[in-house]
Every structure is written in C-alpha cells, then in structure tokens.
Image (tube, rainbow, N blue to C red):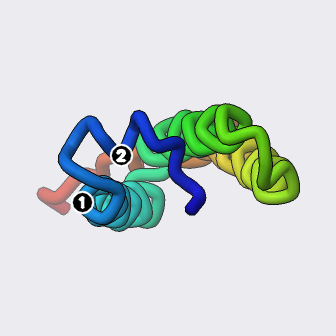
C-alpha cells in the first residue's frame, strides 16, 4: 500500500521488495548502533528514498513529513558522530 508499484515489480512483487527493505533496515539499525559515523548518513539517504517513494504515490504526505523529520534526526546524529565518535587515544601498554 505504501510502495510505488513500479518499485515492487523490480524484484517480483511488493512482498519480496518489502522483505528486502526489512533486511536493509535491520542492517542500517545495527550500523547506527555500532558505527554511527557510517550508519547515520546511510539512514538519512534511506529516509530520503522513502520520502521520494511516498511523493511518487501522491498520497501519505503525513508519513513523508514524519520521515523528513527522521531524516533530519539522522543528519544531526551524523554530525554529532563526526565530532564525538573518534578513536580512543592509545596508551602505553608497557608500563
């Protein structure tokens, strides 16, 4: 219902496409949890793709707006991760 029909036809149906989407979202969630510097921009791009899909449908503008907010949140996390997700300084292990 939320999928633009030409996208579903790419892989043999909407059900298959949504299973692939679910797997990608699980991987993206794990990336954000463990490597936010890498995962947050990926999630932001993914959200933009969802927004484009919903706009192509010509309906569900409320969900597109929600995903726009989530995209902004992912971009904010990416900026924070660039500043604070730095490697720990190496210590001298021979003490």
Q: Residue at x 30, y 47 (%)?
A: 90
What percent of the width, then of the height, locates residue 30?
Answer: 36, 65
Q: Residues within 10 Å of mark 1 (few under 14, many from 20)?
A: some
Q: Secondary structure at mark 1?
A: helix
Helix, strand or loop at label 2? It is helix
At a point 39% along the width and 52% down the height, the residue shown is: 35
**Quarter of the figure with the C terminus:** bottom left
Q: Which residue is mark 2?
A: 8
Q: Quadrant of residue 19?
A: bottom left
Q: Is residue 82 visible?
A: no
Disc with the residue nearer the chain's start (2 vs 1): 2
Is residue 30 shown left or right of residue 13? right
Residue 7: x %, y % from top left: 39, 38
Give the residue displayed 44% in from the left and 47% down from the top.
Answer: 39
Residue identifier under label 1:
16
- In this image, 56 relative to 68: left or right? left
């Amino acid at each position: 219902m939320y999928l633009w029909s030409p996208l579903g036809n790419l892989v043999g149906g909407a059900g298959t496409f949504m299973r692939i989407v679910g797997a990608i979202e699980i991987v993206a969630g794990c990336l954000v949890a463990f490597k936010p510097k890498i995962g947050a921009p990926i999630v932001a791009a993914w959200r933009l793709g969802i927004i484009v899909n919903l706009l192509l449908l010509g309906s569900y503008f409320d969900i597109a707006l929600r995903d726009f907010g989530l995209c902004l949140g992912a971009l904010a996390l990416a900026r924070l991760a660039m500043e604070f997700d730095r490697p720990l300084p190496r210590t001298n292990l021979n003490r």
